[in-house]
Image (spheres, helix red, strand yellow):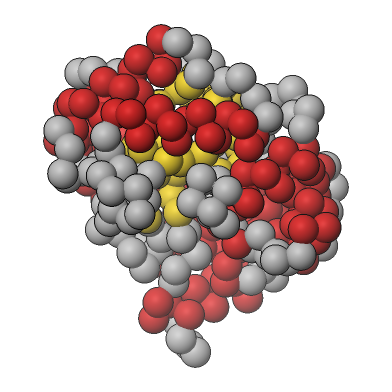
Amino acid sequence: MPTPHGHTGRTAVAGAGTIALGGELTVPRLGFGAMRLPPDPASARALLRRAVQLGVGLIDTAEFYGPGTSEQLIAQALWPYPHGLVIATKGLTHPPDQWGQPGRPERLRQAVEGSLRRLRTDRIDLYQLARIDPTVPAADQFGMLAELRRQGKIRHVGLSEVRVDQLQAAREVVPVASVQNRYSLADRAWEQVLDHCDGEGIAFLAWFPLGAGRLVEPGGALGAVARRHGATPAQVALAWLLARSAVMVPIPGTSSVAHLEENLAAAALRLTDDEFQLLGPT
């Protein structure tokens, strides 16, 4: 097995396997989160281009990263977008900010139109509702996303930080291709949602996937497994996530090219069943 260190080829994420978002957009199961792009625009563009060179097929961003600048930098760096690259973005901050009730249908439409302009595209591959606004009927929010999908402005709809019952309610109104909830070795509060997505074939985009908590303490299991593989604890944590479920899509973010390459090289790492159970039994 190739060592995770120093893997800088164009297919760094190939070993992660793939998933078909919405049953038709096939991407490698190790994506890139664009929340922590470097403050220097040239460095940010170089980082994004390197991610694509390494085989990243899904870049996750949001209108409120910047705000707006993350989407703009993605367009500056990558437009016209390579065939097969999925740009996923999110709308609406929570709790409500200066826009008032962010889940109002008209505000949702404005958010999508703004992302379309900043990303220089006429259709967003995956548009995610960052939070369900509790001050607006959920059915109204889902209904607007369904309407925008019918109009061709959204290809697939995703949700973020949702419970199983909320996901089920949304799916009565609009097909849902993905769920983006926080999940890591140390934070598995959304286990039930992941299991539900696994059973339904819905992609689970894990944000903040490198949280390891006490697992990284000296003498801990994560460090021991990492040493055994000649890998870093972060690479082992990502490898565990990829092994956890076939619908799992970790989206680690970074402002460093070196850290990006380290993260993506985790796709080459294979844990034994004993190592998997030692780190985080299901």
Location of residue 100 with respect to 254 vertically, above or below: above
The reply, left or right, for residue 280 in relation to residue 101 is right
Write down the quadrant of residue 271 in the picture.
Answer: bottom right
The reply, left or right, for residue 244 in relation to residue 155 is left
Q: Is residue 152 visible?
A: yes
Location of residue 58 with respect to 39 vertically, above or below: above
Location of residue 200 with respect to 56 vertically, above or below: above
Q: Is residue 11 visible?
A: no
Q: Quadrant of the C terminus?
A: bottom left
**How many badges with numbers are in the image?**
0
- Considering depth in this image, is 161 or 262 the residue closer to the camera? 161
Residue 216 image offset from top left, x and y in percent: 48, 80
In the image, what residue occupies the spot 82% across and 54% down?
46
Residue 42 image offset from top left, x and y in percent: 83, 58
Residue 234 image offset from top left, x and y in percent: 57, 67
- Considering depth in this image, is 36 or 232 the residue closer to the camera? 36
Write down the quadrant of residue 177 in the picture.
Answer: top left
In the image, what residue occupies the spot 44% across and 72% down?
212
Residue 272 image offset from top left, x and y in percent: 51, 56
In the image, what residue occupies the spot 78% across and 51% down?
45
The reply, left or right, for residue 256 in relation to residue 267 is right
In the image, what residue occupies the spot 40% across and 27% down?
109
The reply, left or right, for residue 123 in relation to residue 198 is right
